[in-house]
Image (spheres, helix red, strand yellow):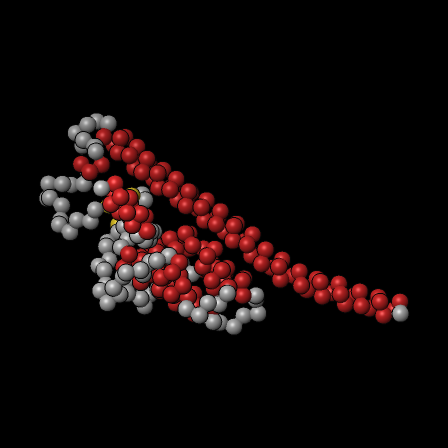
Amino acid sequence: MDILFRIAAALMLCLPISGVQLPPDMSQGIFCESCIAVMKELDKILTKKSSDPRELQVVEAMEDICQSKYFSSYDYSPPTTVKACRFLIEKYEEDIEELLTRKVKDSEQEVCHKLTKACEGVDRTKKDKEPIDYRFNNEKQEVHTQAPPKEDDGIQRMNVDINDPGAAERLAEQIKSQLGQQAMGGGEMMRMKMKKRRRRRRRRRKVLERKMVPEKEMIHNLLKRKLNCRVA
């Protein structure tokens, strides 16, 4: 019995474990299709002629890619694809940059199947239904298709008793509080964006510095040759 238990434990350790990371409230099927859309658009951008080094082209393309304008012709809505795009860049930015800089033959296969495993086991002939994601103050809300009751005039939803003499003051405080929360959320998002931009600017500088090193060495060698010729 003990031997059988050990064999079973060994077999369990050998079994592959699927560790697909997904964006919140998104199915693997939608993430797979979105990943493929992102890689298609990145490939399109990178096929354009440019005098910049490949590394710099890749960094700039990835900085620009997560915008609705690139995803209007795909299976899922631009906001959904943009959400998946941001998740993809946030989690796998450096790995994707390295693959694109090396000019891998099939970026969709390398990123969406091998790297992220977004499309692993997904039947692409069956399209997942896209959920409705409505948010207020950064909080997910339930979408009700039924009309509200006639007796609900909207005031009750603000937790204010219209018969209370101090109702107007409390209502103003609630509105002020909600606006304050919204402003705080917007400020936090702005700080995160600025942090990412600073990081990407540093990476661009590094790329440009690497590009400048061979040029500096070439100038140095030319000057050295000229000096040697004069001495001779």
Image check: 19 left or right of 192?
left
What's the residue at 38%, 60% (across, down)?
114
Res 69 visible: no
Residue 130 position within the rendered picture, expressed as x and y whole percent measured from the top left: 24, 58
Res 228 visible: yes
Q: Point out the image quarter for the C terminus.
A: bottom right
**Total number of numbered labels?**
0
What's the residue at 23%, 30% (across, down)?
167
What's the residue at 47%, 55% (across, down)?
94
Closer-to-camera residue (78/93): 93
In the image, residue 83 sits, relative to residue 175, either above or below, namely: below
Image check: 227 left or right of 109?
right
Q: Point out the image quarter for the N terminus.
A: top left
Q: Quadrant of residue 120?
A: bottom left
What's the residue at 52%, 50% (across, down)?
199
Q: In which quarter of the image is residue 218?
A: bottom right
